[in-house]
Amino acid sequence: MVPLLTGLLRMPQRNAHGTSLAIVIFVGIAAVIPYVAESQIQWPLVFALGIGAIVGAQIGTRTMHNLPDTWLRLIFASFLFIVGLRMIFLESPDVSQEALSDIFSLEAGLAFAIGFVGGAFGGLLGIGGGTLFVPALVLLVSVPQHTAQGISLVVVVLTALSGTFTNVRAGFVDKNTVIWVAPAAVVLGFCSGILAQDLQAEYLTRLFGLVVVYVGGRTVMKTWSQLRER
């Protein structure tokens, strides 16, 4: 979303981040409906992740307002690229839903940390945080892919709401763009959520890994090019 807003619409970088994050609210709500219908949301993990994400989003959003983020974007993009490769080529751990219910208390601190980091990057980069939440839940907390995506979508909405509140007050959200882009994004988000339910977890994990590699690789190349120009 951010590259499209800055490229096609020539929107200033900070405004693109703020506007993208606002659109994420509507997309996340639409996309999470099929996951809720299929009972693929683990609410205790949502709670732990959500608290961390809301706090992190405030820090990330305020940092975006005041500091240059070139090197931070480069580090984050490199991390995404590596994690994406990990999801594509290596087997992911698989834990049953029953087992997950037994380790919530042990994983609460880790979930909070994941939420905090993802929320901070989401607020900073205008991405919601899902590109970090999902790989971290799958690889670190051993959450099944479908469940990880459902949890991530709920927390992404919380992250986007937290960051957008600050962005609107600072004037970094283009409301007209949100009005025009959000309806189409909502329809496709809902349809994609339904499609995801019919994909095997193994294929979904690798597909998500490809997306993460693409986002990370593209961001690395763009950021490195900006650094060379400077």
Image (tube, helix red, strand yellow):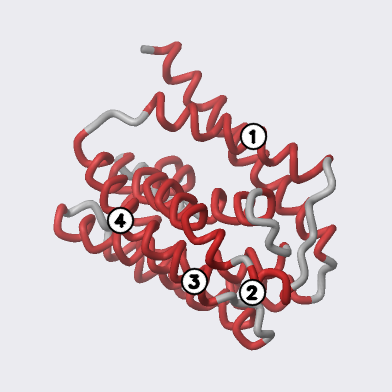
Q: Which residue is mark 1?
A: 81
For discs 1 and 4, the disc positioned in front in the rendered view: 4
Q: Nearer the viewer, mark 2 or mark 3?
A: 2
Foreground mark, 1 or 2, reads 2
Amino acid, disc 1? Phe
Could you give the CA–CA distance between mark 4 and mark 2, rounded to whole angstroms? 25 Å
Q: What's the CA distance linking mark 3 and mark 4?
A: 15 Å
Q: What residue is pinned by disc 4? A: 55
Residue wearing tag 2: 101
* On screen, residue 95 above or below 5: below
Left or right: where 32 falls relative to 122: right
Q: Is residue 168 left or right of residue 24?
A: left
Report the amino acid beneath label 4: Val
Whole-Å distance between the Cαs marked 2 and 3? 18 Å
Number of numbered discs present?
Answer: 4
Q: Nearer the viewer, residue 221 or 115?
A: 115
Q: Is residue 162 left or right of residue 121?
A: left
Q: In whole angstroms, how far apart are the C-alphas of marks 1 and 4?
A: 25 Å
